[in-house]
Amino acid sequence: TPQKSLNFIEQIIEEDLKNNYSKEQLQFRFPPEPNGYLHIGHASSISLNFGLGLKYNAPVNLRFDDTNPTKEESEFVEAIKSDVEWLGFKWAKECYASDYFQQLYDWAVEMIKNGDAYVDSQSSEAIAEQKGTPTQKGTNSPYRDRSVEENLKLFEAMKNGETPEGKDVLRAKISMGAKNMLMRDPVMYRCLHQSHHRTGSDWKIYPMYDWAHGQSDYIEQVSHSFCTLEFLPHRELYNWFAKKVKEADKLKPKQREFARRNLSHTVVSKRKLLKLMEKGILESWDDPRMPTISGMRRRGYTPESIVNFAESIGIGKRENTVNFSHLEFCVREDLNKKAPRVMGVLDPLKVVITNYPEDKIEMLDAENNPEDQSAGSHKVPFSREIYIEKEDFREEANRKFFRLKLGKEVRLKNAYIIKAESCVKDDDGNITEVHCTYDENSRSGSGTEASKRKVKGTLHWVSIQHAVTAKINIYDRLFMVENPTQDKEVDFLEHINPNSHQIITGYLEPYLANAKVQERYQFQRIGYFCVDKTSTSEQLVFNKTVGLRDSWKG
Ligand code: ATP
Ligand code: MG
Ligand code: MG
């Protein structure tokens, strides 16, 4: 039955549609704080919220939770917008919690008037001490019973910047004996004399997350506010605040929680990613080793592969870590359908085809993608001297070595069958050249008997005189262990893989000379590669996206 395939979030919505809401009332939001770039964990939340929007034909807002000016910047706002767009999602409205500062302030004033909030003049240390413990009640602040008039006056002074930072805070008056620690008179506002990326120096007080978030949901009339599990204990406070501001005819948003998704061999936390840059381990948010959306884009991952990944791991109630190889599987699966096939040699060995005319050049046909007939073909030049990969030749090898060995034949992809006759060595015994002969009737696609002749191995190659050189970035896992933050005693930076980046020179077929930034290719028998943003026509730069699991089939 279709009911069975619903995840628990969809079940909540279906229940609500039966009992509480009309379809038209459904509305969601994705609420990032603009204090860093989005990472692969956020992709789960994005595909959940925007996916629900598509499924129920309901609006989804992009809401910036920008209530902490010390860490937030417009650069992050712009990066988040372009990442969500790149993933293929469209938001209904672009919203900012900071747009609600005045409304939030007005409501806070109402709460003071109703005896639901008070200004506390104690230090944050004293307030923390009075919080109590989960098994022991807290202590009331000596300022808890200030008069409404005094509270209003002090709150206004806070707002006007007359109160120094760290002096007064506004607290909700709930109960210092509440079982839920978060209900013990939580702070709603603190003084911060800092410039905000949108409101500048207008505000000298900033609302705390719990106060701002739920009310932003309410102002936008979000029906379901989905957040990660650490906010479960906040739900009671979310509902308490909602009751204080709710008008009779308006919808009360519902907070529900789902589990964070983690990825192995990396860290999905903006704070930790920031640390990698502060320590000089990585240079930027879009380093291709970063688990950020922008890093993955630069690495060559497609938006579809990231969304497929998020959907395939699904939504759950228990936190888990997904292996990096599953993400790579999704990337490969998508690129296999889309990436044109080309040839590039990364560790070259010269091959001379001794019976091929010296100044002859042939332009051979190379199919762009066997998975996609509409992708067409391109030309690849062939000549007497070519490169193959060093590891594709051995003087002698057992019967399972289907590549080139002395006295045996292989097919050159899209070209001829060659046979290794002899090799040249330097003084140290290293092979520097292989001399081969070719079967001139064996050209692929020529229709001759010899062209259909089956030989076991097929190699990629590149004509030396036509090859374009490129700088190739080869990447490996950023951390050497699956879960770098598991052991709390050890700094996660201790687990950094010192060999996560290697730069080599590649020799590529000339078709790639005009490759454009962000284009993705399959280098046959090696893997998928993407043109880096630093690439120019003078100096091509490719990033290795992911290796091929297998060499090509057939
Ligand atoms: P970080 O810890 O990396 O700073 P955050 O939760 O503080 O992440 P926000 O900008 O507040 O980052 O996140 C926006 C939304 O994305 C929130 O609803 C948050 O719960 C969700 N989210 C963040 N990380 C993950 C994750 N690893 N898995 C699923 N959802 C996540
Ligand atoms: Mg957050
Ligand atoms: Mg955070």
Image (cartoon, helix red, strand yellow):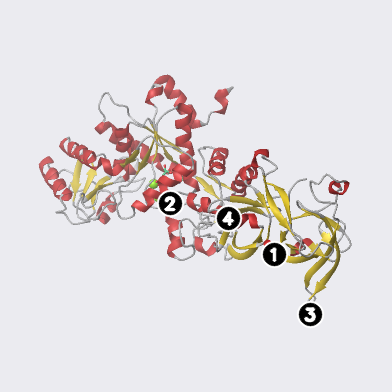
Q: Say which of 288 and 174 sits in front.
A: 288
Q: Residues within 10 Å of mark 3 (few under 14, many from 20)?
A: few
Badge 4 amino acid: Asn
Q: Nearer the viewer, mark 2 or mark 1?
A: 1
User: CB of mark 2 within 8 Å of CB of mark 1?
Assistant: no
**Which residue corresponds to mark 1?**
465
Badge 3 amino acid: Asp
In screen coordinates, is 378 left or right of 234?
Answer: right
Where in the figure is residue 462, as x and y percent of width and height? 71, 59
Q: Nearer the viewer, mark 1 or mark 3?
A: 1
In screen coordinates, is 181 left or right of 314?
Answer: left
User: CB of mark 2 within 8 Å of CB of mark 3?
Assistant: no
In screen coordinates, is 551 left or right of 311?
Answer: right
Identify the element where label 2 is drawn: loop
**Which residue corresponds to mark 2?**
37
The disc, 2 or 1, on the residue closer to the chain's N-terminal end is: 2
**Mark 2 and mark 1: Cα distance apart in space:** 44 Å
Residue at 59 percent across and 47 percent down: it is 327
Q: Residues within 10 Å of mark 1 (few under 14, many from 20)?
A: some
Identify the element where label 4 is drawn: helix
Where in the figure is residue 106, as x and y percent of width and height? 19, 38
Label 4 CB sits under 8 Å from any ligand 1 atom: no
The disc, 2 or 3, on the residue closer to the chain's N-terminal end is: 2
The disc, 4 or 1, on the residue closer to the chain's N-terminal end is: 1
Quadrant of res 440: bottom right
**Mark 4 and mark 2: Cα distance apart in space:** 31 Å
Q: Say which of 22 and 307 sits in front.
A: 307
Badge 2 amino acid: Tyr
**Which residue corresponds to mark 4?**
514
**Which residue corresponds to mark 3?**
427
Residue placed furthest toward the bottom? 427
